[in-house]
Image: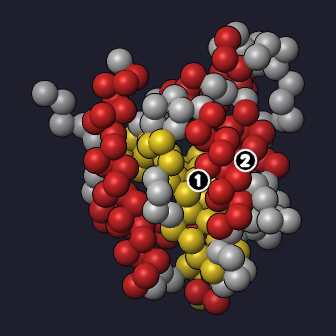
Amino acid sequence: MSTSKPVLTIIIASIRDGRKGRIVADWFAAEAEKHGAFDVRIADLKEIDLPLMTEPNHPRLKQYTQDKTWEWSRMIDASDAFAFVMPEYNHSLIAPLANAVDYLSQEWNHKPAAIVSYGGLSGGQRAAQDLRTRLTALSVVSMPAQVSLPFFAEHIVDGVFEGYDLANMAVNDVLTAMAKWHPALVTLRA
């Protein structure tokens, strides 16, 4: 029996200069490490730098022609679970994340996902709902609970997001739920 932990890939959605996604992702990653159910990795879409979808074939065919696409495919394929760290722009999902999700198909299937959204009053919940619809089409099991961080900037001190009780509890709840879903979804992927 293998004792290795499932891989949780935290995807940082925002790519713009001045973004706060990395700060929120670092906090979430630290909480995930403390939780202990997953081997935690970070995928920063700014560093990955996918162009707008330029593959000639539909992603469901997995007939990629570009090195960046194959690298992204291998990263997502090697993941057992995801946490999408995302802001909300114009009450919706941001373009870099939509693009990154749409680049692939099979690699996402039958894996659990957490949504960590941040923003103003809504805490990114409208964007999170938009992402859930997209994930459902890819057979990703999005956890009903989410980590929503309204007025998140008020919790950034000296460039570090300082988690508070409700936010930390939400992280623990969503990680525990994903850890429970993981074994069943591995069976579906087999």
Quadrant location, the N terminus? top left
From the top left corner, tell me how far across and down residue 165 is, in percent: 40, 84
Task: Judge from the rendering whether residue 32 lies leftward or rightward of residue 86; answer left or right.
Answer: left
Q: Quadrant of residue 52?
A: top right
**Label 2 element class:** helix
**Label 1 element class:** strand
76 over 60 or under it: above or below: below
What residue lies at 43% left-to-right and 82% top-to-bottom? 166
From the top left corner, tell me how far across and down residue 63 is, in percent: 70, 10
From the top left corner, tell me how far across and down residue 130 is, in percent: 70, 53
Mark 1: give few (<14), some (14-19) or many (20+) Cα within 10 Å.
Answer: many
From the top left corner, tell me how far across and down residue 159 is, in percent: 63, 80
Looking at the picture, tell me which residue is in the foreground, 74 or 117: 117
33 over 190 or under it: above or below: below
Residue 84, numbered circle: 1
Q: Do the residues labelled 2 and 1 touch (CB within 8 Å)?
A: yes
65 over 132 or under it: above or below: above
Residue 10, numbered circle: none
Mark 2: give few (<14), some (14-19) or many (20+) Cα within 10 Å.
Answer: many
